[in-house]
Amino acid sequence: MKRILFVCHGNICRSPMAEFVMKDLVAKAGRAGEYEIASAATSTEEIGNPVYPPARRKLAEHGISCAGKTARQMTRADYDRYDLLIGMDDWNIRNMLRICGSDPDDKIHKLLSYVPEGSRRYGADVADPWYTGDFEATWQDVVAGCQGLLRI
């Protein structure tokens, strides 16, 4: 079983989008039983809040439900529980390393490090719609990263 935790700042936009896109992709590939997929925040400010409405709408446009998801904070114990901890941007990665203390097993990666190396988005930050308002750009980044992750 592959255990993947997607992480962003508040766990109300990017990381839940990645969680539910990845769940949808593995289900469509007939591989849902091979994965445990969740998401979390590096901060505490949104704990207990549902997925941000524009993110919910973007998922729903593609037939994906995130019903019942509420934000939670990543903990140090998540490092041992998950095989991969996937951050959305450099800031998330720094905070994840702070929470975990270090990354001795090379589990912490950026989502867009899973797109093909020749891609213009390889290793880039996932667009943050909280600031840009562009949920379509975030959708494209999340789908590309999750598709790449499914290929490994």
Image (cartoon, helix red, strand yellow):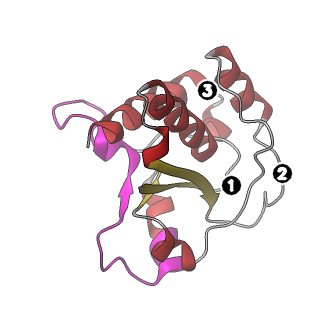
Q: Earlier in the sequence, mark 2 or mark 1?
A: 1
Mark 2, other Cα within 10 Å: few <14 / some 14–19 / many ≥20: some
Residues under numbered marks 2 and 1 in contact, where contact means CB atoms less than 8 Å apart: yes
**Tag 2 residue:** 49
**Which residue lies at the image location 36% right of the left edge and 58% below the top edge?**
109
Mark 3, other Cα within 10 Å: few <14 / some 14–19 / many ≥20: many
CA–CA distance in space, label 2 to label 3: 19 Å
- Residue 139, placed above or below residue 51: above
Q: Which mark is residue 135?
A: 3
**Tag 1 residue:** 10
User: In the rendering, at what x and y percent does residue 90 appear?
Assistant: 42, 57
Residues under numbered marks 1 and 3 in contact, where contact means CB atoms less than 8 Å apart: no
- Residue 137, placed above or below residue 33: above
Image quadrant holding the N terminus, namely bottom left
User: In the rendering, at what x and y percent does residue 151 appear?
Assistant: 27, 37
Q: Is residue 40 left or right of residue 25?
A: right
Residue range of the region highlighted in magenta in the rendering: 95-122
